[in-house]
Amino acid sequence: MKDYPINVFWSEQDQCYVADIPDLHFCSAFGSTPEEAVKEVVIANQAWLETARAAGEPIPKPGSFPTASSL
């Protein structure tokens, strides 16, 4: 299975970088650098998928949520 697209941006309000996975509702993480935010969201991605599988929830396919580059 291919990877989920990840968005990374600076949050002025939170004063940190935020990484999120639009395909996985509420799957996000933060860090003091873009690399740290991505590292943390990869961990959150694994936890999100494990939790959804354990609960019998559907798993969205990667790329099912439009990203800025696909608009």
Image (cartoon, rainbow, N blue to C red):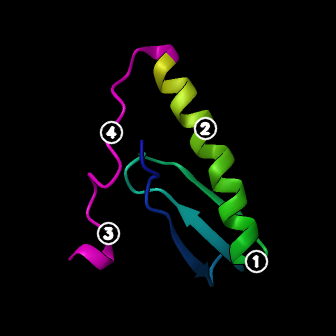
Nearest the viewer among 23 and 15 is 23
In the image, taking residue 70 as reference, residue 43 lies left or right, namely: right
Q: Identify the residue at horizontal 26%, vertical 64% (top origin).
A: 66
- 10 is higher (above) or lower (below) than 64: below
Give residue 8's position: percent from left, percent from top.
Answer: 55, 73
Please tell me whether mark 4 sits on a helix, a strand or a loop: loop
Per the image, the residue denoted by label 3 is: 67
In three-dimensional space, the C-alpha distance between marks 2 and 1, rounded to whole angstroms, equals 21 Å
Q: Quadrant of residue 11?
A: bottom right
Using the image, tell me which numbered label, if any, was put on residue 60.
Answer: 4
Give the magenta range.
Answer: 54-71
Cα distance, mark 3 to mark 1? 21 Å
5, 27: nearer the viewer: 5
Residue 33 is tagged as 1
Q: CA distance from mark 2 to mark 4?
A: 14 Å
Q: Residue at x 31, y 77 (%)?
A: 68
SS for tag 2? helix
User: First in sequence: mark 2 or mark 4?
Assistant: 2
Task: Determine the main secondary structure of the stretch shown in magenta.
Answer: loop
- Which residue type does callout 1 highlight? Thr
For the C terminus, give its image quadrant: bottom left
Residue type at tag 3: Thr
* Separation of residues labelled 3 and 4 (CA atoms): 15 Å
Q: Quadrant of residue 18?
A: bottom right
Q: Which residue is mark 2?
A: 46
Circles 1 and 4 in contact, beta carbons < 8 Å: no
Name which residue type carries label 4.
Answer: Pro
User: The disc labelled 2 sits on which kind of residue?
Assistant: Gln
Q: CA distance from mark 1 to mark 4?
A: 28 Å
* Of callouts 1 and 4, the N-terminal one: 1
Of labels 3 and 4, earlier in sequence is 4
The secondary element bearing badge 1 is classed as loop
